[in-house]
Image (spheres, coloured by chain):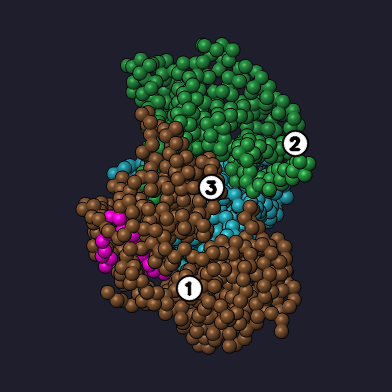
Amino acid sequence: MEDFHIASIVISTIRNAPVLMFAAMAGLFAERSGVVDIGLEGKILASAFASASVAYATQNPWLGILAGVGVSVVLAMIQAFVSITQKGNQLVCGIAINIAMSGLTFVLAQFFFHEGGRTPDLREARLFDIVLPGTAALDNIPFVGWLYGHVIGGQSALVYLAFLLIPIVHWVIYHSRFGLRLRACGENPHAADAAGVSVERTRYLAMLVAGVLCSFSGAYLAIVQSGFFLRDMSAGAGYLALTTLVFGNWRPLHTVLGCLMFGLFGAIQIQLEGVDLPVVGQVSGSLIQMIPYVVTVIVLAGFMAKSVAPKAAGKPFVKSR
Amino acid sequence: MKKTELPRWATGFVLPILNLLSALIVAGVVIHLLGESPLDSLRILIDSAILDPEGLGYTLFYASTFIFAGLAVSIAMQAGLFNIGAEGQMYVGGLGLTLAVLAFDASLPGWLLIPMAMVGAALFGALWSFIPGYLQAKRGSHVVVTTIMFNFIAASLMNYAILKLIPEGQQNPASRVFADSAALPLLNKVLPVFGDTPLNISLLLAIAALVIYGIAVWRSSWGYKLRATGLNPHAAHYAGVKISRTIIVTMLVSGALAGLGAVNSVMGSTHYLSLNFPAGAGFVGIAIALMGRQHPVGIFLSSVLFGALIQGGFDLSLEKPNIPQETFVFIQGLIILFCGAMENFYAPAIMKLLNLTRTSTTKEA
Amino acid sequence: MQPAVEFRNISKAFGAVQANADVSFSIAGGSIHGVIGENGAGKSTLMSILYGYYNADSGQVLIDGQPQDIRTSHEAIALGIGMVHQHFMLVENMTVLDNVMLGNEGGFKLASQRGEVEARLREICARYRLEVDPLATVHDLSVGAQQRVEILKQIYRSANILILDEPTAVLTAQETASLFEILRLFKEQGKTIILITHKLQEIMDITDEVTVMRAGRVVGAVQTRETSKEQLANMMVGRPLQSELPRAPYNPGAEVLKVANLQLQDANGVKLLSDIDFTLRAGEVVAIAGVSGNGQSELLEILSGMRLPTSGSVDFLGQALPYGGRANADGLPATFRDLGIGHVPEDRLRDGVIKDFSVMQNTVFGYQDHVKNRWGLFDFKRIAQRCAQLMQTFDVRPNNPDLRIGLLSGGNQQKVVIAREVAAKPKLMLIGQPTRGVDIGTIESIHTQLLRLRDEGVAILLSSVELEEVRALADRIIVMSGGRITGILPVDEFDTTRIGLLMGGLHKS
């Protein structure tokens, strides 16, 4: 294989992963606190639309990102209210949000922009690759130059944010007071309650964090990757993110590995199109498209990893004696 | 004495109606914000979907598909399974019936061909729900995420399959047109009042399915075991229920019902297999199962309601471009939210109201 | 001197149930105070109010003479009240250290406090001889050790008033003795201990004062040294305990059950049952005595088909029970039922009934395939008849077959379950904790029913944590401890001390 292909696969992987990483980390906080967040998909869509629209209207991608955060947090709080205070079915709530947002984003896009349910091209109002100082100087050195200039450097701000969040999330979950309480609420909320921790408050906070983190996924799709919002553009990313949690056994570092794996599959998928493979020849684009979803099913079937979910995930907390 | 439990009429009627109204009020607010009058929109909707006989025909036509989707989700729900995959199961069911028709529509008469195609639809639908069911039963993989994945896989698979079925020289991404023998008998032959609508015998089939569902779930030991599994799997195991088998069989039945939902549009209306023909019907099924509380009458009424929303929504989107059909996807989500996740939102308020009236009547007595 | 805790006119209702009615009494500081009563007497509710878990409908709680409105457990902890619950409030996949720090972390960064907390924990363990390693993960610890972790948590939080809710339910006799030593050390330090229990012997052994509760009210408050077990029992129950129930002379028939070399290991390789051998004959009651968690539950689950043994055999009426060739027990209970084995499960609400089904629907639970008409659908007329009959024979109240069974009292629910199993005319009846969560009046009627069954020739195997119940019902007693049978003896050799030792793990043939 030519080096060219591997190089572009590596870069593609890094650029594909953040969509899943943000969503997976959001799901991590939610599920570790005991709330199953099936509504990631809806939040991604909503924040993608909001950030694309506001970025276009203000010609400022940062304001767009902020708008995305706001919208996603509102949805997360609705979910939190239904799941935590109302003790409603978390799965149903998540699906409701996903379907509602699928419809609403199209309707609003059509209402504001009249372009068939999508937002106009952002052109300059996007986040562009940050070129690290010294890239040009190192460019001639084989491998190191490429690594510095195009792998570590040359990514957009949100990519850096995604990777920077990894150690932060890990630290918060395992070495902070909030993380300790979070994990207790997800494993044995009665114990947390008896220890004087407010389970409701902790879970609300977890959902708030999830809302914020998830919004970056949508913003990334719209502002960084494509430059506009398109209906249902999340294409299952919210659900794939949940799968990476299963794959990573709800641990931050392992989950991110799962996100990178999916990113890798996405990258390979693009390379495979139109390529003559031995034996099977050219594989139809539709069949290649299936790959991430099939891999998800294989992971969920437990063939790749044995995983143990937080014990109290999905169960509303009811004080009982 | 203060009652702590809501009476059946409150949970069976009042709560669902309040929930539905909440969803519609939120929708109304959004429509208003989009610059249109909610009441005006409602009027157009009712006129188009119920009052106009041809519109009513279309409403019932859509309802026929929705009943099957609603049944599919409902029966899985009774066993405690949340089948989000009805969309994909319906889509693949369409492939099943198409293969049967394409193979035999030249040689077999309608009365043999149509049942065969239906079997094909049910079979392929069941096939598509089998793996998620199996994985849930044997490996504990959550059926919600696996069925969602299978929806996406179905989209890709059917893309591939339909492309292969396009006849020479045709631009339209669809199979060839079925022979006339594969056309479902239309109801407007018997009831001309419905005008030129594709309303066909699927409606009768759907109603028959509702009846069978009602009898099976509430009057047979199979249904009893199903409900026990959904309510308390530990106890169901104690009672001798084979949990694994129950899960798998339920998902198979659910997929089959979803597959049958394909019959109405593919064999009753378009007469060919086209891309994305379910158009979200599988997800409507979820809303119907929740709104109708998995009860045959509830499923029927909810299906008709959604049929009306689609038919009325179509005319509405023509008259008011700010309210495209996707608005009804949004309303669907709201209904799922209020009728499903927030179903007990109004319960404490009703409880208080009932207790107040009770104490005041005892005071008088 | 002000009492450490005083309750004044505390009342609390849950829906239609009055859990506490006008409860008033005080607890002296620096003493061990027992609160005794049967299930449902209101003791746990009262303590939950003290700990801020519930809020009383009316009345006052005073701490050191000051009225306090304790709305959350956080506030209770701040007042120096600590509670060791019956079901441990521990996060199993965290260390002891993390569990102690939970809610009390002392800052946003855990690392800043960890060292200090660990040192303090070790100090407390040494002082009170608790023998717990702060860095151990909770799920690796034994039940007794986990309880000590709970106690450790409370001491760490400077609890001065320590509430223990049925602490010895899961301990052996030896562990109980160690616990009592620890409690005496606390008392010497001036701490106040409230011991909730239903065990008369414990009250006599360790408390200074006793408050007796019955049906939500206080019915007696005495100094321990001035009272006796008999007097306490009378106050607790309200009438002298029935000593002997009528039964036919012991005349067991043919062998019904033969358990040979039964072993059970869980997924982690922990041995839950080892070398279980015993037989059971028609017309006899064999009671398994033992503290909860020593294998009795698992044994009954295996014998009823709900679980597979790892190895060994069970012969029922001469035929081996069909455990072999299966990956799991899915569907097996139905086979066992068809063979003639009835089962009243230990955890009624989890296993025995469907809470949301009606009483009538629950009377066919487990037998749903046997009540069909010729079209394969339910024969509702027959089901209704049967249900009416059962409800009458067993005096199930209220007499409404369409009521959701979750609304019935525990005793009536149990009656429905027993009625259902008895109606199938089993040859072997397995019963786990026949009178758990059942009120006094119903206990006697259930015991009478069981003895009647025995006299009719059914073989009965029951497990019970109540030695009084074991003595009242058994012809023979099997004592289990640590997953093994430590002794089998006829009921006329019943001796509390001996059985206590056997329950504690000492073998005596």
Residue A116 pos. (x, y %): 63, 35
**Magenta region:** C274-301
- Of the residues tagged 2 and 3, which is closer to the observer? 3
Q: CA distance from mark 2 to mark 3?
A: 56 Å
Question: Chain coloured green: which letter?
Answer: B
Mark 1 belongs to which amino acid?
Answer: Thr
**Residue located beneath label 2 in the image:** B32
Return the residue nearer the eye: A267 or B21: B21
Q: Please tell me the colour of chain A.
A: cyan
Above or below: residue A21 compared with residue B168: below
Mark on residue C374?
Answer: none
Q: Pointer 3 indicates a residue of which chain? A: C
Q: Residue at x 59, y 43 (%)?
A: B340
Q: CA distance from mark 1 to mark 3?
A: 33 Å
Instruction: Assess whether residue B120 is covered by the magenta stretch.
Output: no
Return the residue nearer the eye: C116 or B355: B355
Q: Residue at x 55, y 32 (%)?
A: B299
Query: Which callout, 1 or 3, points at the residue further toward the start of the chain?
Result: 1
Q: CA distance from mark 2 to mark 1?
A: 65 Å
Mark on residue C397?
Answer: 3
Mark on residue C168?
Answer: 1
To the question of a shared chain for discs 1 and 3, the answer is: yes
Location of the N terminus of chain A (image quadrant): bottom left
Mark 2 belongs to which amino acid?
Answer: His
Q: Pointer 2 indicates a residue of which chain? A: B
